[in-house]
Amino acid sequence: MSVEAKLKTLDVEKNLGIVNLSDGEQLPVPKLSMLKIIKIVKFLGVDGAKVYSQAREVLIDDSYDQIEKYAVILESIQEAQVMRIFSIILDIEDDEALALDINESLDVLLVLGENLDFEKTFTQVRQLMKKLFNKELPDFKELIDRAFPEVPMEPVKEETSEAVTEEEPKKEEASA
């Protein structure tokens, strides 16, 4: 194979895409290198394990109802921790990741979603976490089920304006 043919087979593009920011700037969305995967695994192994441990304690505490449990867990998570994986992926500082608006963040996720096999990537991260830290992360489906459990909803009783006006005369009659 000639040098020219070898060069054509090399993947020299370092970005998956570009996100246009609201200020007119462009944010490149880099490929996920193994270095980034390892940084994510290390983050999950340290901060993620701490958050998971704290969340687990809250989840098994019966003194809270389900909504209170989520509130306590969310309150314990620092904003920078939430955006840390974005920071790693985008090669930007935590405060820069926090400064992205919702549409810019979603655009980054869309670029990643269009160009990555997230399930395969998540599996790789789980495997590295197991090897490096001997910690077992739940599988992707279990993680989603835990994050968004099915909560039975009580039917909401709608009050119509007729029902309200019918009750008012009855109250007046009772007080007379």
Image (cartoon, rainbow, N blue to C red):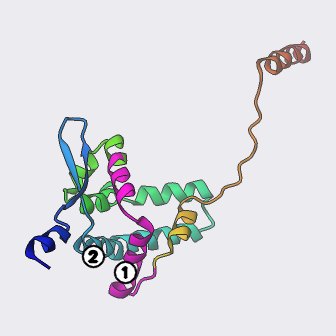
| Highlighted magenta segment, given as a residue range | 107-136
Residue at far left of view: 3
- Residue drawn at x 55%, y 68% is 141
Q: Earlier in the sequence, mark 2 or mark 1?
A: 2
What number of labels is visible? 2
Is residue 114 rendered to the left or right of residue 173?
left
SS for dot 1: helix
Q: Is residue 142 left or right of residue 42?
A: right
Give the residue at mark 2.
38
Q: Position of residue 72 (x, y in %)?
A: 49, 58
Is 147 inside the magenta-drawn segment? no
User: In percent of the image, x 19 and y 44: which residue is there?
Assistant: 26
Q: Main secondary structure of the magenta part?
A: helix
Per the image, the residue denoted by label 1 is 129
Along the line of sight, which residue is nearer the eye, 43 or 9?
Answer: 9
Relative placement, left or right, of 153 versus 134 is right
